[in-house]
Amino acid sequence: MSRRIAVFVDVQNIYYTTRQAYGRQFDYRKLWQRISAEGEIVSAIAYAIHRGDEKQLQFQNALRHIGFTVKLKPFIQRSDGSAKGDWDVGITIDVMEVAQQVDTVVLLSGDGDFDLLLQKIRKDYGVRAEVYGVPALTASSLIDAASVYHPIEEDLLL
């Protein structure tokens, strides 16, 4: 029987960490092929920030073409110049909603805030929790909370 897999992508985190570590972009198509070989992708959501520029719209359409559902949140510029665009709670809710219906949850993020989420779904639902993240920029607590950690290296970059 094929494994049922749900994929969750923290787009901002992956964009900034691959750019910082490698100066390159992540290859979502290659990721999709790799995960598809492991089982059936029943849900795949990419969480992004909507700035409305042409390049970003093309990227979001490319993700949809591969098979991702793209969830957008408006880009908020604060009066002090800092920006807000955080999907942590949205990702957590979606993972909790699907965790009982799949065998594997795949999270693309290096954000240590997700460590408790992965511990919880593994303990409560016996689900496999896999993490893809850039080695130098992935929280060790997140790596420890995962069933399997996949370092994002050259082979997953454009």
Image: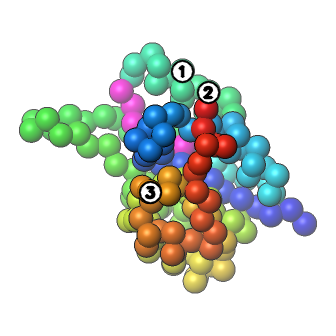
Q: Is residue 17 left or right of residue 127?
A: left
Return the disc, 2 or 3, that comes first in the chain's sequence: 2
Question: Are the two marked residues, 2 and 1, in contact with CB atoms closer than 8 angstroms?
Answer: yes
Instruction: Give me the residue at 46% from left, 24% from top.
Output: 56
Task: Tell me if residue 53 comes above or below residue 111 in the rendering.
Answer: above
107 in relation to 66, above or below: below
Rendering quarter of residue 27: top right
Disc number at residue 58?
A: 1
What secondary structure is found at the residue carrying circle 2? helix
Circles 2 and 3, Cβ within 8 Å, touching? The answer is no
Res 73 quadrant in image: top left
> Which element type, helix, strand or loop, lies under badge 1?
helix
Dot 3 lies on which element? Answer: helix
Residue projecting furthest to the top? 54
Label disc, if present, on residue 62 of the rendered structure: 2
Give the labeled residue for mark 3.
136
* Dot 1 crowding, Cα within 10 Å, few <14, some 14–19, many 20+: few
Q: Sort mark 3 into few (<14), some (14-19) or many (20+) by Cα contacts within 10 Å.
A: few
